[in-house]
Image (cartoon, rainbow, N blue to C red):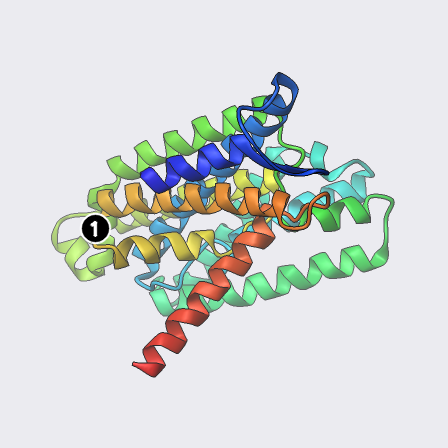
């Protein structure tokens, strides 16, 4: 909590200008530019972390996340396709297309996994294949060229640059609502993570619980993608880090992972603004670098030990 508060204060009060570093409460204009980005980044981190918690519990795999299983890719394809075909800006497409694209990928994932009774390994492999296919479709669409291709490429990094105060507030409200729903679903997630036999023995309806949890995970990832762009590694890293810190139960893992995801995204947004000043790096890209570096460090550390 103290780390999160410190990073949030730094994001709001510490910055760079042409003369060097500047610390102190910003002017009204600067504050109005900063707080939507900070709130939007924190909300995106919370939402992606919750989506990751749900998927890792359902798939029973600590490497499951909305970007790996194709839900983020589905939202991305829907947004990019709508922008290119409609000729509008990627930032004006809206969350509806993103949610629809993510849910279509989810429906395809469930349909393909039905033949194998939605086995966790099959769902994971199917999601990876779908994500790779959809990512290729996005690249093909961009290669075809459009007037908005440059803006789309910048958006694909997961930037908070264009997030307005209203969008940040709505995303934060949605993320907090998602947290409440996850806490209410904690019994479902606990039983599903224990295995289908245990869930059935406790009279849990798998036909209701699994699609409902997957829909929530897909919707959270789609909303973040709609307003910030694709954000990778947060949904993978935050739940994993929460478990390593001792959060084993669903409620504790959701709360801790949400906090870690929020701090990671706020810190990534701040680093993206400061690292190459006056140029800016997208928060999603910085988060991917930090997340990828963290997992490489874990692999090297375990190999050394």
| Quarter of the figure with residue 118 | bottom left
Q: Nearer the viewer, residue 101 or 72?
A: 72
| Left or right position of 296 against 228 | left
Give the quadrant of the N terminus.
Answer: top left
Give the quadrant of the C terminus.
Answer: bottom left
Q: Residue at x 60, y 65 (%)?
A: 132
Could you classify mark 1 by the number of other residues whose Cα lies within 10 Å: few (under 14), some (14-19), or many (20 or more)? some
Q: Residue furthest front?
A: 19
Check disc 1 and report its element: helix, strand or loop: helix
Q: Residue at x 68, y 50 (%)?
A: 276
| Left or right position of 26 against 241 | right
**Residue 131, percent across and down?**
56, 61
Instruction: Please name the residue that numbered disc 1 is placed on.
Output: 190
| Quarter of the figure with residue 46 | top left
Q: Residue furthest left?
A: 201
Q: Nearer the viewer, residue 119 or 284?
A: 284
**Residue 8, percent across and down?**
45, 35
| Quarter of the figure with residue 251 | top left
Q: Is residue 99 visible?
A: yes
| Left or right position of 305 against 190 | right
Q: Is residue 69 visible?
A: no
**Residue 263, percent across and down?**
42, 43
**Residue 139, percent across and down?**
73, 60
Q: Nearer the viewer, residue 267 or 274?
A: 274
In the rendered view, would you say 8 is above or below 253?
above
Q: Residue furthest top?
A: 28
């Amino acid at each position: 909590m103290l780390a999160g508060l410190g990073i949030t204060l730094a994001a709001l009060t510490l910055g760079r200008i042409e003369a060097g570093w500047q610390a102190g409460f910003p002017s009204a204009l600067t504050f109005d530019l900063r707080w939507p980005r900070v709130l939007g980044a924190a909300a995106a981190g919370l939402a992606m972390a919750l989506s990751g918690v749900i998927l890792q519990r359902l798939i029973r795999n600590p490497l499951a996340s909305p970007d790996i299983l194709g839900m983020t890719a589905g939202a991305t394809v829907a947004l990019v396709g709508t922008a290119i075909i409609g000729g509008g800006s990627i930032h004006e497409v809206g969350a509806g297309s993103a949610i629809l694209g993510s849910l279509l990928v989810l429906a395809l994932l469930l349909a393909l996994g039905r033949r194998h009774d939605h086995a966790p390994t099959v769902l994971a492999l199917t999601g990876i294949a779908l994500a790779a296919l959809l990512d290729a479709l996005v690249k093909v669409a961009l290669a075809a060229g459009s007037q908005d291709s440059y803006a789309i490429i910048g958006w694909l990094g997961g930037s908070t640059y264009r997030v307005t105060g209203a969008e940040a507030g709505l995303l934060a409200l949605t993320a907090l609502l998602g947290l409440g729903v996850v806490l209410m679903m904690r019994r479902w997630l606990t039983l599903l993570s224990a295995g289908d036999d245990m869930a059935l023995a406790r009279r849990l309806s798998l036909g209701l619980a699994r699609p409902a949890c997957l829909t929530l995970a897909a919707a959270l990832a789609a909303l973040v993608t709609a307003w910030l762009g694709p954000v990778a590694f947060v949904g993978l890293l935050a739940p994993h880090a929460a478990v390593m810190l001792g959060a084993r139960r669903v409620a504790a893992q959701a709360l801790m992972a949400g906090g870690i995801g929020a701090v990671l995204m706020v810190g990534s947004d701040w680093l993206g603004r400061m690292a190459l000043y006056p140029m800016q790096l997208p928060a999603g890209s910085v988060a991917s670098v930090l997340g990828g570096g963290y997992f490489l460090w874990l692999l090297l550390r375990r190999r050394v030990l």
